Image: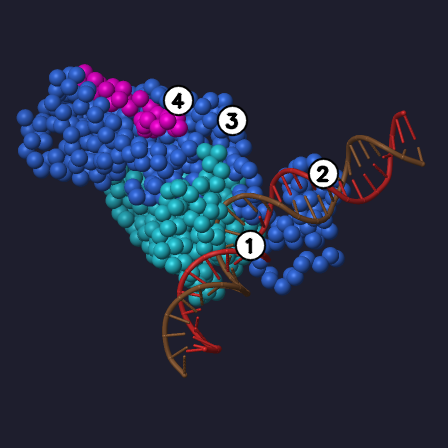
Chain colours: A blue, B cyan, C brown, D red
Amino acid sequence: MPSETAGSAATRRPTIQDVAAAAGVSKGLVSKVFNGGAGPSAATTSRVIAVADRLGYRPNRSATLLAKRRTRLLGVTMLPSNLFHGELADLIQPIAEKHGYDIVLGSMTGYSHERRAIETLIDFRCEALVLVGPTMPAAQLAAIIGNVPAVVVGRKVDLPGADVVRCDDERGVHDVIDHLVALGHRRIAHLDGGSGAIAALRRRAYRAAMTRHRLEPVVLPGGMTEEDGARAVTDLLGHSAGVDVTAVATYNDRCAVGVLDALARRGIDVPGEISVAGFDDSLQARHALIELTTVDQSSAEQARLAIQAVMERLDGTRAERREIVLPPALIVRRTTARVGRRRGE
Amino acid sequence: MPSETAGSAATRRPTIQDVAAAAGVSKGLVSKVFNGGAGPSAATTSRVIAVADRLGYRPNRSATLLAKRRTRLLGVTMLPSNLFHGELADLIQPIAEKHGYDIVLGSMTGYSHERRAIETLIDFRCEALVLVGPTMPAAQLAAIIGNVPAVVVGRKVDLPGADVVRCDDERGVHDVIDHLVALGHRRIAHLDGGSGAIAALRRRAYRAAMTRHRLEPVVLPGGMTEEDGARAVTDLLGHSAGVDVTAVATYNDRCAVGVLDALARRGIDVPGEISVAGFDDSLQARHALIELTTVDQSSAEQARLAIQAVMERLDGTRAERREIVLPPALIVRRTTARVGRRRGE
DNA sequence: TCACCGATGTAAACCGGTTTCCAAGTTCAA
DNA sequence: TTGAACTTGGAAACCGGTTTACATCGGTGA
């Protein structure tokens, strides 16, 4: 039996050199065996593979990445606790794989980590980035990604090197407001999504839609989560000004669910007393006990188009910037209804 | 102005060699500047940093990983679309960071990808693994992780090298069944979680609890998602055998939510006609329109203990295997009630 | 018999960092 | 004044692969 180098450290992983020595060939040849290049004969190939198997050899990823010209890695930033992001990542994975790319997830927890997450992905030499709902200012974003091909998903942002795939948020918001106005609502509040860029966009769209209907906008400071939605309701009902709001259009479904929660706890009927509309058409929204009126952004389609865009960049098929805007679809469910009377009136 | 090497390829990222050349020092010294070792003087340090800044230098992660003895990387496997996993990953990140570790997310989509996800993390030379709810058989798992320190979260599994942090699932299930029995239920069905290991455990616990109460177990084939829960209800009500079930204890909250959904669509009152209990105490469960009776597994505590366990392994503080079992907490909400009369009886 | 060719394999450079070892210069105490 | 110790920095080995240039060899056609 050929000696396997020292064999002293039971802990050290075998390297390509160990395999080469055990098989009695050079390490260059072993590399060719695994990368399917011309050179090794059939006999050698099977012998090397057998030895590698016996030794439990697996190539060192870092070394491979360092030595190879291309990494075939796709970086995807996401917020792990955001189900929308998670679903998108799930959808992206198999598509990227079909194109021969592995994906690396960069988890951004909170705002400051967004920068770090992107930098980490670039440091791993990802060939392209898929940025799911980044919240940074465009200029900062541009500075960080430099000339790495990127596609931004879900947010309107003007970066020379980055494509954009998103749903037409403005139209989605307008559709919601039109729907509520058609139901007779006049005092329609918007529960916003905080300081992010998408939140700002939807807020502006809300203001525009209200103005178009000659109605006065009421923006409630909110956030991205159920807690934010619930808290906003507490704030709203605390003020006397809030009591005559008959409908709330929220930043996303999560907020809307929080709003429904808070209203239910107070015994306020939806949609009898207040109508509520969300945004995303998440799984939660479809639930029979919730049946939230919301806007579908067709995330599967977004995932597909995002990968396609990035692949075109990598193939060199296309160099000019592209923005793909998908039409949203208003999904009317149970939580919106014709404006009604207040309890006790 | 010092020349910056060739300057021809505007695209190539500057390397440590470029910085060294531009600053007029050796690359070894540049490395020391960034890694805070003894050697460089204050003047040199600031000069090198200035040059690096100007050039936009960032170290190549692969090269660093390859050259360094330690990677200070923690691999975390997760299913991106699973909110429970996402929340756990979110909780793990800051704790790991406090210990000086970065985390790499390995996304496993479906069963076969679980192996690939773990292998990828090992190939990245993660020093330790946090496996969130792995579904593989223990023997396979052992073969893949080899002697990489690992902690399994949420699942009872007996691997010599791997610690386990989990909630006492058996007790959680027993608590649920005891609770339902105390409410007078006798025909209590279990909607199981499919083929995974955790599902098997909870299924067995359910059978044991029923047997203890001298009741006959009824296991409905389910799965992990809302759809599975809803489908199980359809199946159940299709059979005449199903109609006398008065309570359903599900594998997790997601199924339970699906069950509630399906029941609501059929106009079956919960908890008037059927009681439903979940498992996880997820955000969904707490919602005012749902108020699901469920079991809390204190995921924040699990995250903390998981990192602690893995750090002890890495520090060499502890070598023997440890299994930490957290007590579950039954959370009684609205969806379970004293057994009632059927509609129309 | 000779020049040439394809198949197979080796040696060495290289990817971009880190780390060890050593040299040169400075400072300081004896 | 000398030499020990400390500071600062450079040269080179190394991490584990990939890739290029080249060597070797049996076979082949002229």
Q: Residue at x 16, y 32 (%)?
A: A220
Q: Quadrant of the N terminus of chain A?
A: bottom right
Q: Which residues are magenta?
A: A154-182
Q: Secondary structure at mark 4?
A: loop
Disc 2 residue crowd, few under 14, some 14–19, many 20+, Cα 10 Å: few
> Gap between marks 1 and 2, in whole Å?
32 Å
Q: Label 1 marks which chain's residue?
A: B
Specify the label residue B146 is tagged with: 1
> How far is mark 3 from mark 4, CA to CA?
15 Å
- First reached walking from the N terminus: tag 3 or tag 4: 3
Mark 4 is on which residue type?
Arg
From the image, state whether disc 1 or disc 3 is nearer to you.
3
Q: Is residue A272 left or right of residue B76?
A: left
User: According to the image, label 3 marks what residue?
Assistant: A315
Where's residue B276, x and y in %?
32, 41
Chain ID at mark 2: A
Q: Earlier in the sequence, mark 2 or mark 3?
A: 2
Looking at the image, which is closer to me, A266 or A296? Answer: A296
Callout 2: SS: loop
The answer as to whether the residues below labels 1 and 4 share one chain is no
Closer-to-camera residue (B294/A92): A92
Name which residue type carries label 3: Asp
**Image position of A288 (left or right of A263):** right
**Location of residue B42 in the rendering, given as x and y in whole percent from the top left corner:** 35, 57
Q: Is residue A160 magenta?
A: yes
- Whether residue A104 is visible to the viewer of this picture, yes or no, is no
